[in-house]
Image (cartoon, rainbow, N blue to C red):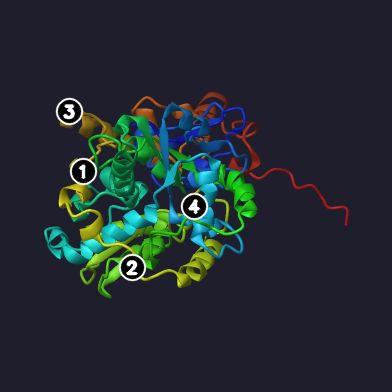
């Protein structure tokens, strides 16, 4: 899998902020620079948000990709609409995208609305899953389950994401209207987060990607301002209703699906992990459906947006008042259940596996526990790992040395020089003896 999150090493100062905030412990700091254990990364974008030096970024496709196709279609995520002040009609954004060079626009919100209608009309699909049924809409949450909560894979809905459904239908429509071959048509999503950029190129639920690329909302925001301001009146009406646009903020999917009151809508990676752990332990038996959003407030809080998620949510709630409750029907637009179904089975990704040989893995696990008991347990991060357990694992797996822990170095220095001088070279917070107190001038 080619991840979209990357580190610009010239900017990185090895401050460990990203390492301490990564929910999957996928970041280490070695030789003064952060590194990503790519197999553990879920592209949630937490490191992008918290990096004080702007050294971590998400790579989206360059806008020049449009030149490779004879006909291009834009798939704007509904979170895009909440980025603009005083926006009165969705059509103004759609016209702005056409002014940028796209030949057509197909709203991701329409794909979301069609999936919602499918869920209402085919409740039997969800009935085949274990309760609570878990949404498959968030790529970051989906990959998190694959690597940390494999027992919950049987709970995930079998439908594709709104972005993928919109791409399939947009390409089909473009082929019918233009007569071009499918490969001559470029379908590009405009996405709010790094996880969707990765999913556009490496989907977890499809054998082959259905998109040709993805642009971040942040990259297109400034490009859109000028053409949108020049438009007198929008000419392209929105093809989605309230049900589809609501998917942009947390709780919108559950509401659009017509879920009962027995549902959870969870946002933020820490909360998502906590709820998944509770489901795994069977501590939420009275829930039927769970909507997971890795970003705060949902997609409007994605790391590739420009507006505060709470402000964007307010704007969307105001904007959808003029939209119909439902603008399209699954039976009229799709009709074939095979289109909305994933064709790739979700599988456990054993990224935390110590060794394929169980005996060797048990020996390594024992060595990790033995070393961890010798560590101070302060979670200081000075070793370049997010926890003492992670550091012990790094040592056993050959990713670090025992001397990377300053407390291990102190023990070695005491053995060599005696207890009197072994702490002098350490930073003040880690010295075991008190230094001299400098009297105050007051």
Does label 2 or label 3 sit earlier along the sequence? Answer: 2
Mark 4 = which residue? 94
In 3D space, how far apart are the residues under numbered discs 2 and 3 (Cα atoms)?
Answer: 54 Å
Distance between the alpha carbons at the discs numbered 1 and 3? 24 Å
In the picture provided, is 327 more to the left or to the right than 80?
A: left
What is the secondary structure assignment of the residue under circle 2? loop
On the rendered structure, is 389 left or right of 420?
Answer: left
Residue 83, located in which quarter of the rendered image? bottom right
Mark 4 or 3: the one toward you: 4
Mark 3 secondary-structure assignment:
loop
N-terminal of the pair, mark 2 or mark 4, is 4
> What's the distance in space between the residues labelled 2 and 4, CA to CA?
19 Å
Mark before the other along the chain sequence, 1 or 4: 4
Residue at image mark 2: 326
Query: Residue 113: image x %, image y %?
Result: 32, 60
Decide if residue 380 is in sight here.
Answer: no
Q: How many tags in the picture?
A: 4
Numbered circle sitting on residue 346: 1
Residue contact at pointers 2 and 4, CB within 8 angstroms? no
Q: Name the residue under label 3.
A: 357
Question: Going 55% across and 65% down the picture, which residue do you hit?
Answer: 88
Q: Is residue 340 above or below residue 321?
A: above
Q: Which mark is residue 42?
A: none
The secondary structure type at the circle numbered 4 is helix
């Amino acid at each position: 899998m080619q991840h979209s999150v990357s580190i610009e090493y010239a900017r990185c100062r090895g401050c460990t902020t990203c390492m301490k905030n990564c929910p999957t412990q996928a970041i280490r700091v070695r030789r003064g620079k952060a590194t990503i254990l790519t197999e553990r990364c879920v592209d949630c974008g937490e490191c992008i948000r918290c990096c004080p030096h702007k050294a971590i970024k998400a790579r989206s496709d360059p806008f020049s990709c449009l030149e490779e196709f004879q006909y291009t279609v834009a798939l704007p995520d509904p979170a895009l609409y909440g980025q603009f002040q005083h926006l009165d009609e969705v059509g103004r954004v759609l016209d702005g995208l056409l002014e940028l060079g796209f030949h057509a626009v197909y709203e991701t919100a329409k794909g979301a609305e069609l999936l919602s209608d499918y869920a209402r009309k085919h409740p039997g699909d969800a009935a085949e899953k274990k309760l609570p049924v878990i949404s498959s809409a968030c790529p970051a949450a989906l990959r998190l389950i694959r690597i940390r909560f494999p027992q919950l894979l049987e709970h995930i809905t079998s439908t594709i994401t709104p972005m993928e459904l919109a791409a399939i239908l947009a390409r089909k429509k473009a082929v019918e209207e233009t007569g071009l071959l499918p490969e001559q048509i470029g379908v590009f999503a405009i996405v709010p987060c790094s996880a969707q950029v990765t999913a556009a190129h490496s989907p977890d639920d499809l054998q082959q990607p259905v998109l040709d690329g993805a642009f971040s909302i942040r990259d297109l925001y400034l490009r859109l301002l000028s053409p949108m301001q020049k438009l007198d009146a929008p000419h392209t009406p929105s093809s989605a209703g309230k049900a589809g646009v609501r998917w942009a903020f947390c709780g919108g999917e559950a509401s659009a699906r017509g879920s009962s009151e027995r549902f959870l809508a969870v946002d933020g990676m820490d909360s998502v992990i906590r709820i998944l752990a509770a489901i795994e332990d069977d501590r939420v038996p009275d829930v039927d459906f769970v909507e997971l959003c890795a970003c705060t407030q949902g997609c409007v809080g994605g790391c590739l947006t420009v507006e505060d998620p709470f402000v964007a949510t307010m704007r969307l709630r105001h904007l959808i008042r003029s939209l119909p409750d439902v603008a399209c029907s699954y039976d009229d637009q799709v009709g074939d259940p095979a289109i909305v179904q994933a064709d790739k089975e979700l599988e456990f990704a054993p990224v935390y596996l110590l060794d394929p040989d169980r005996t060797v893995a048990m020996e390594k696990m024992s060595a990790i526990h033995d070393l961890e008991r010798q560590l101070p347990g302060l979670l200081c991060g000075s070793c370049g790992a997010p926890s003492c357990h992670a550091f012990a694992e790094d040592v056993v797996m050959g990713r670090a040395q025992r001397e990377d822990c300053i407390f291990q170095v102190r023990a070695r220095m005491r053995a060599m020089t005696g207890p009197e001088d072994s702490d002098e070279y350490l930073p003040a917070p880690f010295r075991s003896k008190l230094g001299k107190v400098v009297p105050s001038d007051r």
